[in-house]
Each structure stands twice: as C-alpha cells, then as structure tokens.
Amino acid sequence: MSFDEFERVVALGKFVTIIPEGASIRVSELATFTVSKIESLLEPGDLIGVVRDTLHELNGEPTSSDLCREAFFRFLDEPT
C-alpha cells in the first residue's frame, strides 16, 4: 500500500499501536489470548511519523532527526 493509503488506514482506526484491553487476539493456529495489561512506548499519533522516518531511512533520505540535527548545527554556526 502507498504511504497515503497507510495514513488513511491509521486515521480510520484499522491499524493501531495499542490493542484495547479485553480484546481477544488470535495468532494463526498458534495461540489465542486476551489482552489484560496495556503498555506502549508509542503514542498512536506518533505512528505516522515513525513510519515516515523509517521509509526515508530505508530510501537513503534524511529522517526528521537528521533534519533537526542539521538545523541545530546550522544555528550553532549562524545563530542570527
């Protein structure tokens, strides 16, 4: 799927970073379990940025961290 399609899927709530408590999860033919404790290091709103940065990194393009670092060093060179 394209990145635009991915953004739409996330906006519709069909791709999530946190599974709702009480949800039943089935891992094909391996196991079924119920979510009872939710912990996540990634906030739902951060997902798009993380995926965008990963795609940039895989394509040899600067990530948001790279751009921020570059801007910081330019500021140190020329703070005005």
Image (cartoon, rainbow, N blue to C red):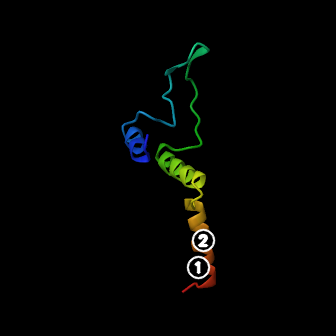
**For residue 75, which numbered disc appears in the image?**
1
Q: Percent position (x, y) of residue 45?
A: 46, 47
Q: Circle 1: is it few (<14), some (14-19), or many (20+) Cα within 10 Å?
A: few
Disc 1 to disc 2, C-alpha distance = 9 Å
Identify the residue shown where x is 59% and y is 78%: 74
Verify CB contact (< 8 Å) between mark 1 and mark 2.
no
Outermost residue, front side:
59
> Identity of the amino acid at label 1?
Phe
Residue 22 placement (x, y as % from top left): 50, 21
Relative to 59, 1 lies left or right: left
Above or below residue 21? Residue 4 is below
Location of mark 2 (residue): 70
Q: Locate the N terminus by quadrant.
A: top left
Q: Nearer the viewer, mark 1 or mark 2?
A: 2
Left or right, 48 with respect to 76, comes to left
Position of residue 52 measured from the top left corner of the image (x, y, whole percent): 51, 51
Q: Closer to the N terminus: mark 1 or mark 2?
A: 2
